[in-house]
Image: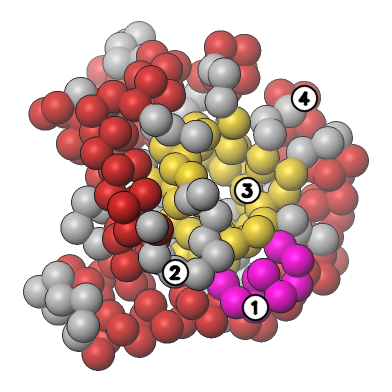
Amino acid sequence: MIELGVNVDHVATVRQARRTYEPDPVWAAVEAHLGGADGITVHLREDRRHIQDEDVRRLRELTHIRLNLEMAATDEMVGIARRIKPEMAMLVPEGRHEITTEGGLDIASQEAKLRQAVARLAEAGIVVSVFIDAEVRQVEAAGRIGAAVCEVHTGPYAHAFHSKGRDEESPAVAAELQRIRRAGEAIRSLGMRFNAGHALNYFNVEPVARLPGVRELHIGHAIVSRAVFVGMREAVREMKQLMLQAAR
């Protein structure tokens, strides 16, 4: 059955705008769990622009569903993950000047470095995921470094969907979906888990949720945005319902 991982980074973004103690990402995680989330995702960035080290510690202590820690493949972050021990660590590219993650990790160009990071995380009992573009060569590289999970970057699909009038049958949208499908097939053929995420929302999620073999979608900004109006629990419930209906 398809699962939903809810990213609560932007609850922390609102908090950090005032450098105060609310809204609390841990409270958001509990509400997301009550709404039907199967996991919680946070990205501990090197510049600590939203999620803070203490947030990760408290989430590890207080949440009762899977914790996925997004992180750069640096010694500092690998050390934090080994100490905190989330159920899953997802290696992502990271730039100080980007607003959000702008593309997948280029595994093929840095296999030796990433293989070492994956090994250190796996040694600590952490399932290792990599965030990649929908390219078979990156899938193959992920297999070579020992990743257990590949999360396919759905941003290009989401942008095509929005720019083409939210028309699932548009050639541009269909082409991006086909790229994700092919990447998913390659991921599964190599024995890895096929996840997907980035820029998914209430309008574009269903075609991705229908793809064969997709195990989990990670969604954050759209859910937090809707939660402003309907609350976190209801926003998660609505997203999960859309995903389950599509997957069926």
Per the image, label 3 sits on a secondary structure element best described as strand
Q: Is residue 233 left or right of residue 138?
A: left
Q: Position of residue 133 (x, y in %)?
A: 52, 72
Residue identifier under label 1:
186
How far apart are the alpha carbons under marks 3 and 2?
21 Å
In the rendered image, which quarter contains the C terminus? bottom left
User: Quick check: marks 4 and 2 in contact, CB under 8 Å?
Assistant: no
Q: Is residue 45 left or right of residue 239?
A: right
Residue identifier under label 2:
211
Q: Which residues are magenta?
A: 184-192
Look at the image and say whether residue 221 sits in the magenta stretch. Answer: no
Dot 4 or dot 2, earlier in sequence? 4
The secondary structure that dominates the magenta segment is helix
Q: Position of residue 64 (x, y in %)?
A: 57, 18
User: Quick check: marks 2 and 1 in contact, CB under 8 Å?
Assistant: no
How far apart are the alpha carbons under marks 2 and 1?
13 Å
Residue identifier under label 3:
90
